[in-house]
Image (cartoon, grey):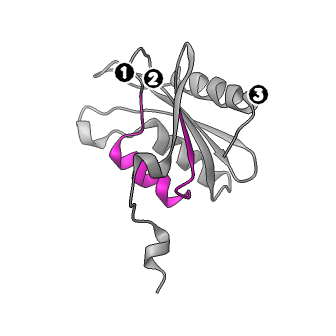
Amino acid sequence: MNLSIDLQQRLLQAALAARAYSHAPYSRYAVGAAVLDEQGRIHGGANIENAAYPQGWCAEATALGAMVMAGGRRAVAVLVSGPGPEIITPCGGCRQKLREFAAPELLIIAADPGGIRQHWTLAELLPFSFGPDHLKF
């Protein structure tokens, strides 16, 4: 999917704004995400850490939850923003969560406060994935 520069910038701004609400007192690694749904709406989310480490959740999961709660059912693009300078990608669990709501062609954009750094499709980051279509028999 090709997104206009304007839409990519809107996703970036939404992810950076969400990142400001990150709760990362343990890692101090604030992450923001923005999901574009099938209706053209943008949903933001931030990572939320917990003292019992596995109980926290990622920015992508927060953004997907916001999308579903707003009535969205398909993600068509996602932008993830970390603090930089290393390029950030969704973790393995988030790649699978994205797969639940997106096709393998989902555009995943990596960014930091300096701007957009790189992009991939979900299929490139999660090849040979297992998704809802596998359960239709």
The residue singled out by tag 3 in the image is: 6
| Residue 40 pos. (x, y %) | 75, 46
Magenta stretch: give its range: 88-109
Q: Secondary structure at mark 3?
A: helix
Could you give the CA–CA distance between mark 2 and mark 3, rounded to whole angstroms?
20 Å
Q: Nearer the viewer, mark 1 or mark 3?
A: 3
The residue singled out by tag 1 in the image is: 29
Could you give the CA–CA distance between mark 1 and mark 3, rounded to whole angstroms?
27 Å
| Residue 126 pos. (x, y %) | 40, 51
| Residue 4 pos. (x, y %) | 75, 34
Q: Nearer the viewer, mark 2 or mark 1?
A: 2
The residue singled out by tag 2 in the image is: 82
Amino acid type, residue under disc 2 in the picture: Gly
Q: What residue occupies the far left of the structure in this picture?
A: 52
How crowded pointer 2 is (Cα within 10 Å; few <14, some 14-19, many 20+) is rated as many
How crowded pointer 3 is (Cα within 10 Å; few <14, some 14-19, many 20+) is rated as few
The answer to which of marks 2 and 3 sits earlier in the sequence is: 3
Amino acid type, residue under disc 1 in the picture: Tyr
Which corner quadrant of the image does residue 109 belong to?
A: top right
